[in-house]
Amino acid sequence: MHTMKISHQETYHHQTGALDTDTRQLIKCVLGQCTGLLKPRWNESKALSTMSRVVGQLLEKHRYTYNGMINTLYVDDRGDDVKFLSAVAHIIFQDGTVNWGRVASLTSFGAAVCQYLKDKGRDNCVEVAGEEISAYLVTHHKDWLVKHNSWLRSNGFVEFFPVAEPESRSRNIIMTLVGLAGIGAAMTLLVM
């Protein structure tokens, strides 16, 4: 009997390929649910139900802040271009710290943008925003996501956010965004 030995590198590439797919699916589903364009299913994954719960709580608590940021970013003037979400992500992670609270904060801001755009009749932007956020995460933080047990094939995200208040884990990130939203020079980068 011949046994195949799978290298660490092959295992990593398999994990990261699945991670790309899982991330895109998760983020797009959460944004779809937050906008009402996608209804929750009774058999959804723990990661999806956890992310939906956390994002919903953050949206409820920080609606005013997110709306101010949307106005500061001149979202109405951008048409269907949501590339500014990657620029916001760069600001969130600019100090090199990656954690689930920041991932949830980025996703909740993306959900606020999607709700705003849907209300303006631009439903197609939800898919594009989901792609923008997930592409940023898997491009810039893939190793971190794999190392911290990702979401759909493991429980890293779910374990970080047990059924409890996400506020304490996300407050600092949101306060940083609020501070940056008030600084015209920092936001100029996002307007370009």
Image (cartoon, rainbow, N blue to C red):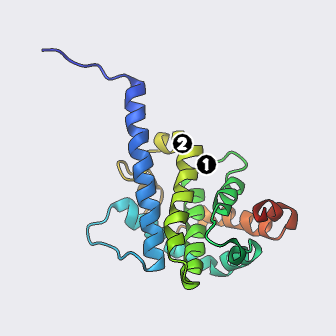
Q: Is residue 148 left or right of residue 76?
A: left
| Rendered image quadrant of residue 112 | bottom right
Which mark is on residue 107? none
What residue would you read off at disc 2?
144
Q: For marks 2 and 1, give the CA distance.
A: 7 Å
Quadrant placement of the C terminus: bottom right
Identify residue type, mark 2.
Trp
Residue in the picture at 70% in, 57% down: 87
Q: Give percent across and percent down for residue 76.
A: 69, 78
Q: Is residue 131 left or right of residue 4?
A: right
- Crowdedness near tag 1: few (<14), some (14–19) or many (≥20) residues, C-alpha within 10 Å: some
Which tag, 2 or 1, sits closer to the chain's start? 1
The relative height of residue 188 versus residue 98 in the rendered view (above or below) is below
- Crowdedness near tag 2: few (<14), some (14–19) or many (≥20) residues, C-alpha within 10 Å: some
Q: Give percent across and percent down for residue 173.
A: 67, 62
Asked if labels 1 and 2 touch by Cβ distance under 8 angstroms, the answer is yes
Residue in the picture at 69% in, 60% down: 88
Quadrant placement of the N terminus: top left
- Nearer-the-camera pick, 44 or 173: 44
What residue would you read off at disc 1?
98
Residue in the picture at 41% in, 66% down: 29
Q: Decide if residue 187 is in sight here.
A: yes
Q: Give percent across and percent down for residue 91.
A: 72, 56
Report the residue that reaches farthest toward the right: 185
Identify residue type, mark 1.
Val
